[in-house]
Image: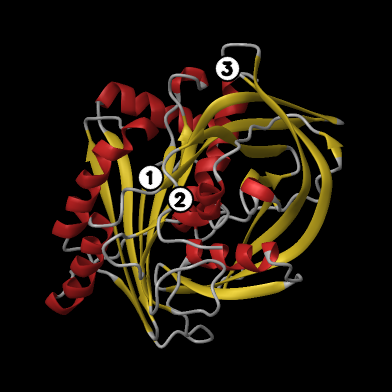
Amino acid sequence: MNYTTFHTCLAFVLGFVEASLTRHVRFIPIKRPYKSGSTSIQRVVTPSSRSVISAYRFSILLALFSLFLPQVAKTTAADRVPIVEALGWVRSAPRDIAEFDYVMTARVRIVFFWAGKDDVGGGYIRMGVSKSDSRLELLQVLFGSDPAKAPRAINRWGAGTEVVWHKDPAVHPAKNDDVTASAFFGFMKSSKGKSVSEMQEELRKEKNGGEHQFTGILSRVEAGHAISLVVPLASSEDYNLHQYAEAEPVMLDRLSASDRPPRILDNPQGCARAGEFLGAVSQLDDIAIEGGKAPQSLCYVYDAQVNTLALEHLEPIRAFTAKVNSSKGGTLTENTYNDLLQADFTSTHQITGKRVNFSLLLGTQGPLRGVPIQIRYQPNWWFQVVLNLLPKVSSPPPALSR
């Protein structure tokens, strides 16, 4: 895969992260289900059973990150109160949590077959519950290209942190929808280019000018009310996905000091829930793994706008062989899994009707129960991105049961 092709592919990957800049980019779902037997491109883990509990609730994806255009008025004192409080939730979110690492593969269809490159980027999924308050739950994702591995050292990534407040201690599968409030913090390496040439020009300007563009969003939701704030950040440091821990407080400070106008939504029509995207995915994953049937859906509010996340289709997969090659050559990992479950999702914006589609391949038994073994999305007929689970697990998820 040459630089131009990879750059186009990565544009679609990060296009998902910055979907709000173009009002929810349309993603086309994978038409054919996973087949029993052999496939190429994948990577998996065998975490402890408690660690796994946390992973399945994250299906990722990737949508997690949409960032929207700023407005022109200024934030009022009344607006700042919920914003500052939500920023405090994010800053104090639990850190002693389970982590599941992923590797990125980009694939391009050439007539009748797929060609691609493994190990061009990656990221992680994290989840846990606060030890000091078991009602506070954290869901976090980070994905993007790795400049050390990607052609031309391309650096494009996005991260999302969702803090969820429950009425009762957080457990999974949840017996009811008891979310009372939530906050989503999104942070991404910005890119406004809509073509390969435009993105090449962005890279050239960044290199020559020494200024790199990032975007942050804070979205807070409670039953009957939502508020969100978006801010830009121009930095002399070209933060990459491995520097997220260093970059995160910079953007949080930027949001805290901003006088930009928030977007506000009162009494959202058709959605009384207090949850956001990652929490909605988590709940639908619970339903799928516990034997629920598709289709099923949940509304969620993001950037003070109503969306619907639908679990469109479920299909059992008897056997699946996953293989990922290393960027340095050779096989990174190869494993065969039995009794998996393919879950196909669609997120639809209430006003525009724009849709984002993605698929998860989930474990159903033992320590891999509910773990997203593979995450796929395909924005058009000729391009596909795959995120594969890597064999690395940190501490087990605290305060969760199954």
Q: Secondary structure at mark 1?
A: strand
* Residues at marks 3 and 2, CA–CA distance in whole angstroms: 27 Å
All told, the count of numbered labels is 3
Q: Amino acid at mark 3?
A: Ser
In the image, 293: left or right of 53? right
The reply to whether residue 7 is in sight is yes
Q: Amino acid at mark 2?
A: Glu
List x then y, in percent, for residue 222.
36, 79
Mark 1 neighbour density, 10 Å: few (under 14) some (14–19) many (20 or more): many
In the image, 284: left or right of 400? right
The reply to whether residue 347 is in sight is no
Tell which tag, 3 or 2, sits nearer the viewer.
Answer: 3
List x then y, in percent, for residue 399.
41, 61
Q: Which residue is mark 3?
A: 327
Q: Which residue is mark 1?
A: 188
List x then y, in percent, for residue 378.
68, 45
Q: Up-down: is 375 above or below 322?
A: below
List x then y, in percent, for residue 105.
62, 31
Q: Which residue is mark 2?
A: 18
The answer to whether the residue labelled 1 contacts the one labelled 2, judged by CB atoms less than 8 Å apart, is yes
In the image, 95: left or right of 315? left
In this view, the residue in front, 398 or 363, is 398
* Residues at marks 1 and 2, CA–CA distance in whole angstroms: 8 Å
Q: Secondary structure at mark 2?
A: loop
Q: Residue at x 16, y 79 (%)?
A: 78
Q: Amino acid at mark 1?
A: Met
Q: Up-down: is 376 above or below 135?
A: above
In this view, the residue in front, 60 or 47, is 47
Looking at marks 1 and 2 on the same chain, the residue that comes earlier in the sequence is marked by 2
Tell which tag, 1 or 2, sits nearer the viewer.
Answer: 1
Q: Residue at x 74, y 67 (%)?
A: 291
Looking at marks 1 and 3 on the same chain, the residue that comes earlier in the sequence is marked by 1
